[in-house]
Amino acid sequence: MGGFRRSLPRTTMTVRSRIVLFLFFAGLHAWTGAAELPKPIDFVIRGHRIPSDAYSLYVREIGKQEPALAVNAETPFNPASVIKIIPTLAALELLGPAYRWKTEVYTLGSIRDGVLQGDLLFKGYGDPYLVSEEFRKILEELRRRGIRDITGDLLIDASWFRIAHEDPGAFDNDPYRTYNVLPNAFLVNFKAVRFHFYPAPDGRNVMVHPEPELAGLKIDNRLRLRKRYCGGFQRGVAVTVPDSKTADQVIFSGRFPAGCNHYILSRSLLTHETYAYGAFKPIWRQLGGTIDGRVRTSAAPATDEPFLVHHSRPLPDIIRLINKFSNNVMTRQLLLTLGAELEEPPGTAAKGIRVIDGYLTGLGLDTRTLNIDNGAGLSREASASAKLLADILAHAWTITYRPEFISSLSISGVDGTAKYRLKHKAASGYAHVKTGRIDDVSAVAGYVHARSGKEYIVVGMMNRKLAHKGHGKELMNALVAWAYGL
């Protein structure tokens, strides 16, 4: 397939290097046309002195071949999270809207008088949304089926995916941020912890409460109150994880402002296995159950039928959560699922990329500018041209499941990552878009329902130092607002 080389997990080539090579070999010339740009867009570009090669803009009426605006449209740019539209659309067409992930539970021993004489095993199939509430439903069903006490261990089979060795801090040297969580076939609650901070009644200390409660996670609270207004980076809370391998202890230190009645800070801690066990124990205890053993990995028995099978939300619900709220690990779970289901298990990123490449080339699209990388856009290597993204969106407009796909995108000024985009402006509520933002990258792609009654595809990307700090979003908003006025 044309994109086989893109299935490699890493490349030393930067996006800018690929741009140079692509222009050289393809003989393409970026059209800047700064003097001919629409006035609202030109105003932003001139006001911030944005170089003509730092942005790509594309607007085309649906059903038409000629664009209303095309600037650097065939040059590859880093799209950040805008690239999520590709795996989500591919999954919707290839897996179908009725697709659900399953989680199997096996009882490895006899059950007598509510006691499982043996181990309890979970086999994950990559459910991207096995959050605490869904996990609790599984445990409640186990209790309803007569299990109370478990004499053995909690076993986990995550072999449905094969995850290449990867440093979760490789992207930005911040491995405990929740956006950096690595995928896993048995992903519980995104492996995330929300810490709630409150001033203590004594006026000196700070109370910290984790959500969810996790057995095995040690919290060392060294915070003290200071008399000041509620503000500052992380409200003065410093986070330290002494052991990066186990990540089973977190130290909070610093001076917390007394003016903050409540503050929430999220981090990813523990390993996938110890997190699952840590989430299991307190819920199981609340349900009146006990477990004697520890957590370990093990393969599910090939010949036994599962004791219980839990099914996830349907795929359209999942892609809505991905696109509206730009969830990275959910997208990566989806990419691996495509590989496992449409090639063969175990699912890998390389297999998922091959599936998507075959899907796009099957549509007759030129994917030479495309590098999906991990599928989520949290990458310095990901790339796509505005023209390719527009062609993908044009295809999405024609499919049977168009309503499911479009409804997964954020509505300008209304919800998701676009909730505060163009709010109280004329275009508020008239664009369904996917936004993208990482350091030095700002992007948007989607559909604008113009006041003329026409429908437009809009794609914009800026790759420039500090593009994420404001002027990138300003340019993307100007592009969407201009398209609305057509």
Image (cartoon, helix red, strand yellow):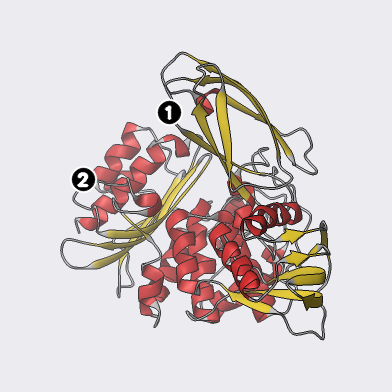
Q: From what the image shows, is residue 116 above or below residue 209?
A: below
Q: Kindly identify which residue carries mark 1.
A: 261
Identified at 54% across, 67% down, the residue is 87
**Location of residue 143 by image quarter:** bottom right
Q: From what the image shows, is residue 147 above or below residue 323?
A: below
Front residue of 152 and 344: 152
Identified at 40% across, 37% down, the residue is 50
Element carrying mark 2: loop
Whether residue 480 appears in this view of the structure is yes
Q: Position of residue 480 (x, y in %)?
A: 30, 53
Front residue of 154 and 405: 154
The numbered mark at residue 424 is 2
The span from disc 1 to disc 2 (Cα, nearest Å) is 30 Å
Q: Position of residue 38 (x, y in %)?
A: 25, 48
Q: Amino acid at mark 2?
A: His
Q: Nearer the viewer, mark 1 or mark 2?
A: 1
